[in-house]
Each structure stands twice: as structure tokens, then as C-alpha cells.
Image (spheres, grey):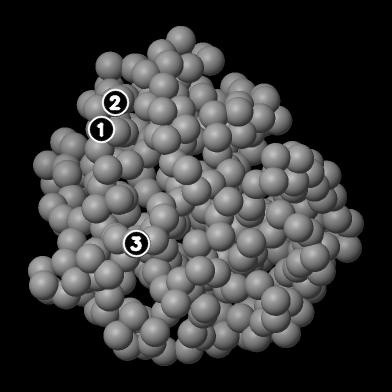
């Protein structure tokens, strides 16, 4: 495994590195931030690749009544800076509760009672943004088969295949990304097969079940390189880091605002954030989207601690390839 991983890292050396961030206006608001100011600030420090969400619960609050104003301004702001966007579509999208149905949809009911409405909603989103110059790729669902985390009740492979076919039919011009559900050895082998696979990397989490302390995942960078090369060998598909932990993980399910800065630092401080960027480079994967950019700005604006923000500012200013084109350069 080490040898395969090291080969992958070596084979990717000639390619440029691109960093991006996930950005969720709802989360910025929950931290007491102005979402537009937050995204603007991220653009000001050099972020040029965003992973955005299209929460069904936000956009279609009543049947056939759509409000795209929030997502529209995100795209408009990205276009103003020639930034690129990976847009997540589907029911399961980043951040708790993971699945985001509107109040008028019961996803615990039989699939055939609500899947048509989901597909109709997805069609509206895809058709609205498929020709937007900022759009770089789609991410279909998010860690779809991860049953141990999130308030989700449906894990039908048939549904995922149906969504993949719909997305490919409506927009054959952009790549589709599908994320792995965990860090286990092995590779996705069944349908649907996307253009690009992604993986989430979390390094330091709170163990609420056994030790009741912070745990550092032991996986080295070459392990993720091994998984990426295994995917290359099996399906000739590229892999990116779609979610790299760059945010504190509060203990016992606390919210960030309810957690003291000292406790937040036990999970993530400036030194650990610097190491996250370094770890991403060490995997050999050339697209890394960091998780927690809103949190960096929260620390700066609300807690008056710019330490994380300064690390991010330095890393993004040093990263010379922020056009987000690597997804299409990979052989």
C-alpha cells in the first residue's frame, strides 16, 4: 500500500495544486456572520474555488415555489472574481442534518411518494446553473451511503443511479463528482460511476462514545494516495479531496458559539491548520476543498482571533493556481 501510494504521489508531482473551500451561507448566518461579507472576504484572500450547496429546504419551501436568490448571488459574486464553483445537488448535502428535505416532504415515506418531487427540484437547479460560466462541476449528493452520520433515512442505490442519469442527460458538458462514504480500504465498484471521485479527510475528532476525548485519525497521507491510485488503476478515474477538516470539532455535540476558544483550540489551532494544508499536498491529490472557511472568519470577526484567517490568507496567496481547472487537466 505504501509503495502504491508513493507511486501516485510521485506521478502527480508535475501537476499544480488547487485549494478551494466549502461555503454555506446558512452556516455563516448561524455563526452570527453576514454571508455576503463572508464570501467576499474569502475572495479577498484569494479563494477562487468554492463548493456550494443547493439545499432543497431553502429553495423550494412550498411545492412549486422556488427562491434561488441566495444561490444566485453566490454565483454572481463568484463570476465577478472569475472564481469556479462545484455545486452540490440532491437530497443529501454538506452540513447537519446532511439530508435537507423541505417541511412538506416526508423522506421516511415510500420512495415513490417523494422521489418525483426531488427529481423535479433537481431539474430546476441543474437547468438554472448549467450554463453559468462559474460552474466547474457538479457533486451528486454527499457521502450518500454513510448511514452512521446525519438525519437520513433513504440510501437507495437505485435512486442515486436515477439522479446520476438525470444529471448526465440534462448537462453532459460538466463533470459529475460522487464522494466515497468512508476511509475504508477498497474502492467503489458499482453504479453509478462518476467522472471524478472525491473523499473526505477528517484528522481530529471528539470521541463521545468510549474515550470522551479528542482522537487523531492515524491514516498517513500516503494512505489516501493509495486509495486515489487504486481508483486510477481500477477505473481510470481521478480523485479529489472534497472535504478536508479545517474547523474545530466541539465536544459532546456542542455548537461552535457555545464552545470556548480554549476548547476550540484543542481541536484546531493555527499550527494544526497549517498542517492541514501540508497534509493535503502530501496526499498527491491536486484539488483540496477545505471545510470550515466560515469558521475562520467567525474566529476573526466574532472572537477577535485572526490566527486561522492569517494561515488561510498566507496559504491561498501562495497558491498560484486558483482557477480550478485541474479537474479537466487530469489525464
Q: Residue at x 46, y 51 (%)?
A: 18
Instruction: Please say if the residues under marks 1 and 3 sit with CB atoms less than 8 Å apart.
Output: no
Front-most of residues 132 and 317: 317
Q: Residue furthest top?
A: 304
Q: Residue at x 45, y 20 (%)?
A: 299
Q: Would residue 166 appear left or right of 41 to someone viewing this image?
A: right
Query: Is 43 above or below relative to 129?
Result: above
Number of the front mark, 3 or 2? 3
Q: Label 1 vs label 3: CA separation?
A: 27 Å
Query: Is 23 above or below relative to 255?
Result: below
Residue bearing mark 1: 272
Rendered location of residue 116, percent (x, y): 75, 79
1 or 3: tag closer to the N-terminus: 3
- Residue 141 visible in image: no
* Residue 269 tag number: 2
Q: Label 3 vs label 2: CA separation?
A: 31 Å
3 or 2: tag closer to the N-terminus: 3
Question: Which quadrant of the figure contains the N terminus?
Answer: bottom left
- Residue 244 visible in image: yes
Amino acid at each position: 500500500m505504501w509503495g502504491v501510494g508513493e507511486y501516485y504521489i510521485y506521478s502527480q508531482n508535475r501537476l499544480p495544486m488547487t485549494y478551494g473551500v466549502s461555503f454555506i451561507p446558512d452556516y455563516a448566518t448561524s455563526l452570527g456572520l453576514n454571508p455576503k461579507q463572508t464570501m467576499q472576504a474569502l475572495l479577498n484572500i484569494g479563494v477562487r474555488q468554492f463548493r456550494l450547496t443547493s439545499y432543497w429546504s431553502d429553495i423550494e419551501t412550498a411545492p412549486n415555489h422556488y427562491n434561488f436568490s441566495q444561490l444566485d448571488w453566490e454565483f454572481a459574486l463568484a463570476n465577478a472574481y472569475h472564481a469556479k464553483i462545484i455545486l452540490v445537488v440532491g437530497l443529501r448535502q454538506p452540513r447537519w442534518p446532511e439530508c435537507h428535505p423541505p417541511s412538506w416532504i416526508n423522506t421516511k415515506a415510500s420512495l415513490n411518494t417523494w422521489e418525483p418531487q426531488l427529481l423535479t427540484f433537481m431539474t430546476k437547479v441543474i437547468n438554472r446553473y448549467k450554463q453559468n460560466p462559474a460552474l466547474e462541476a457538479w457533486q451528486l449528493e454527499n457521502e450518500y451511503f454513510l448511514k452512521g452520520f446525519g438525519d437520513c433515512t433513504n440510501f437507495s442505490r437505485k435512486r442515486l443511479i436515477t439522479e446520476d442519469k438525470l444529471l448526465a442527460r440534462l448537462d453532459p458538458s460538466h463533470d459529475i463528482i460522487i464522494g466515497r462514504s468512508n476511509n475504508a480500504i477498497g474502492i467503489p465498484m458499482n453504479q453509478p460511476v462518476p467522472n471524478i471521485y472525491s473523499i473526505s479527510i477528517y484528522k481530529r475528532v471528539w470521541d463521545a462514545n468510549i474515550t470522551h476525548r479528542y482522537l487523531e485519525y492515524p491514516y498517513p497521507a500516503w494512505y489516501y494516495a493509495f486509495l486515489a491510485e487504486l481508483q486510477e488503476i481500477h477505473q481510470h478515474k481521478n480523485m479529489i479531496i472534497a472535504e478536508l477538516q479545517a474547523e474545530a470539532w466541539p465536544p459532546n455535540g456542542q455548537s461552535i458559539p457555545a464552545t470556548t476558544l480554549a476548547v476550540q483550540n484543542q481541536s484546531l489551532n493555527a499550527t494544526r491548520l497549517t498542517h492541514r494544508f501540508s497534509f493535503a499536498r502530501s496526499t498527491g491529490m491536486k484539488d483540496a476543498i477545505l471545510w470550515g472557511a466560515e469558521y475562520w472568519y467567525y474566529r476573526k470577526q466574532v472572537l477577535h482571533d485572526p490566527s486561522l484567517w492569517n494561515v488561510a490568507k498566507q496559504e491561498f496567496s501562495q497558491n498560484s493556481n486558483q482557477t480550478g481547472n485541474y479537474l479537466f487537466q487530469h489525464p
